[in-house]
Image (cartoon, grey):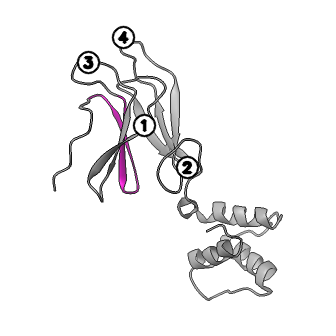
Amino acid sequence: SPVAPMSTARNGFAAAAVGDTVYVFGGEDGNRKCLSSAEAYNICTRTWSHVASMSTARLACAAAVARDGIYVVGGADGNNNKLSSAEALSLPRSGMSPFNTPSQKKLNAVERLKRIEAELSLTSVQPTILNRINYLEEQMFGESKNGTGSLNDRISNLEKEFGLD
């Protein structure tokens, strides 16, 4: 199906996708002006919106998604000087603003268990994820829920107990 045009025509930009959103960063416009602006396309609503601009205008850069956000690195400025700098745009639970943490639903099981253990001030010595879940359930509920529900559901129940969901 058709995709709406970006607010700013650009080429030589970096792009990254997270969930239902495609982000574009920098590039150059039709007048060959190097851009610092960024836009986000929501594939559900089929609309573009502006997001925080980068501090440095850059084209021919690269973008990568990592645990806590999108990193835009390298490229060149408007005078074809190569850039070694990098910028990060954090991805909060809803919307997009700098310096927030990613949704806990996107964290893997081990990271989720570490958060729960930190809330209990525990250091796990359990060798497997299943053993860690059993141990945490015993600490919180007095018994393990072993065999009842998926590992993800069991971790979610533990998170709910601490308001970490």
| Start-end of magenta stretch | 11-26
Q: CA distance from mark 4 to mark 3?
A: 10 Å
Query: Which label sits on residue 63?
Result: 1
Q: Tell me: residue 50, above or below residue 117.
A: above
Q: Label 2 belongs to which residue?
A: 67
Q: Secondary structure at mark 4?
A: loop
- Disc 4 to disc 2, C-alpha distance: 33 Å
Do residues under tags 2 and 3 come within 8 Å of each other at their CB atoms?
no
Q: Amino acid at mark 3?
A: Arg
Note whether 45 is above or below 88 in the view shown. Answer: below
Residue position for label 4: 79
- Could you give the CA–CA distance between mark 4 and mark 1, rounded to whole angstroms? 21 Å
Residue 80, percent from left and from top: 36, 13
**Amino acid type, residue under disc 1 in the picture:** Ala
Magenta region, main secondary structure: strand
Mark 3 and mark 1 residues within 8 Å of each other at the beta carbon: no
Distance from the alpha carbon under mark 3 to that under mark 1 = 21 Å
Magenta segment includes 132 = no
Q: Residue at x 65, y 60 (%)?
A: 111
How far, Cα to Cα, is label 2 from label 1?
Answer: 13 Å
- Who's the residue at 44% across and 32% down the image? 53
Give whichever of discs 3 and 1 has the lower sequence position: 3
State the image coordinates of residue 2 (x, y, percent, origin top left).
16, 52
Placement of the N terminus among the 4 image quadrants: bottom left
Image position of 140 (left or right of 103): right
| Residue at image point 59% right, 48% down | 100
Q: Which residue is mark 3?
A: 32
Q: Nearer the viewer, residue 14 or 110?
A: 14
Position of 154 with respect to 125 (left or right) is left
